[in-house]
Amino acid sequence: MRDEVSYSSNNTTLLTTAITVLGLNVVLMLVKLGVGYVGNSYALIADGVESASDIFISVVTWGGFLLSLKPADENHPFGHGKIESLVGILSGMALMGAAIAIAVFSIQEIRSPHAVPEWYTLPVLIMVVFTKELLFRKVIGLTEENFDSRALEGDAWHHRSDALTSAAAAIGISIALIGGKEWAAADDWAALVACVIIFTNAFRIIKMSLHDALDGKVATSLVKALREEAGRHPQVCLIEKCRVRKSGPGYFVEIHVQVDGSMSIFDGHALGHEVKDHLVAQFPSLLDVTVHLEPFESK
């Protein structure tokens, strides 16, 4: 099981990343609201309001993810990993809600003619797009390289949703600046297109989080690799079963191996530990491995 030292190390790294991400989000929110108000950009103001909700969701997401990394205790012998799946569902629902809210606001703005935004709102939006895309890549990188986390994936997509809506607004403002007042609603039409992308990814995150929460099937490639590595032990005759369930960013494994039926209990116990230690060494994401021994039956 993950020990306290590992938990503390992960906690420190993730906390530093979380504080950095949240700090940048607060700065961007204030810039969006301020420039949007002065520059007559309703899209930028809406983007700033949506960023404010993102800050709250990010606090919940990162807090929940850090809790999911806590080691097992007396009341939670299998750890706290399921918190991560629950937070992933919450993050996906919040992302879906943001997409709907932006779509409703965009439709209202399309139906209500408004003035053309000031030119200086455009470079601000471009800056927001690049910053948000960098945040997306930073958080999604943690997910892909260190933690297989639906919660962090959801938070990453909150940043990309900001980048998409800001990019849509930038395109729309560019069209409005070139075309004049008749094209003032172009940024709202572009935002509607971005909402479809955001909503689709929110649905995918919720679906995957529910799958993990219900101990759904993990990647076939992982199960295959576990079976192959366990089968490398010279005294393992056959791998009968291998069941894996996801818990937070880690996995619990139950594997049934067939061995010589005449093996003593003492030797079988030692073999089981050798198989477990080998798998844990090869796959750092494993939280625990249970090895069942079965007598080998040749066919």
Image (cartoon, rainbow, N blue to C red):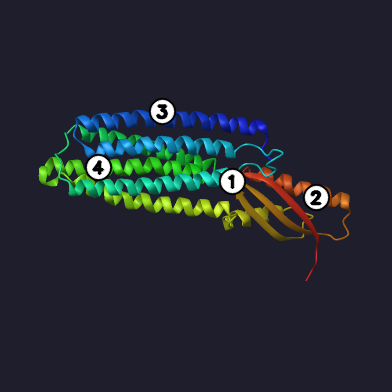
Of the numbered discs 1 and 3, the one sitting upstream in the chain is: 3
Q: Which amino acid, by three-letter code, is at mark 1?
A: Lys
Q: Residue at x 88, y 59 (%)?
A: 262
Mark-to-mark CA distance, 3 and 2: 51 Å
Mark-to-mark CA distance, 1 and 3: 28 Å
Q: Nearer the viewer, mark 1 or mark 4?
A: 1
Q: Which amino acid, by three-letter code, is at mark 3?
A: Gly
Q: Which amino acid, by three-letter code, is at mark 4?
A: Ala
User: Residue 271 — which label?
Assistant: 2
Find numbered disc 1 in the image and state the secondary structure of the residue it sits on: helix
Residue 214, position in %: x, y? 58, 54
Label 2: how many residues lie within 10 Å, few (<14), some (14-19) or many (20+)? many
Q: Which amino acid, by three-letter code, is at mark 2?
A: Leu
> Would residue 25 appear left or right of 293 to someone viewing this image?
left
Q: Residue at x 29, y 33 (%)?
A: 127
Of the numbered discs 3 and 2, the one sitting upstream in the chain is: 3
Q: Note whether residue 162 is visible.
A: yes
Q: Note whether residue 249 is visible.
A: no
Q: Are marks 3 and 2 in contact (CB under 8 Å)?
A: no
User: Residue 23 — which label?
Assistant: 3
Q: Quadrant of residue 40?
A: top left
**Pointer 1 residue:** 82
Find numbered disc 2 in the image and state the secondary structure of the residue it sits on: helix
Of the numbered discs 4 and 2, the one sitting upstream in the chain is: 4
> Would residue 145 appear left or right of 245 to someone viewing this image?
left
Mark-to-mark CA distance, 2 and 1: 31 Å
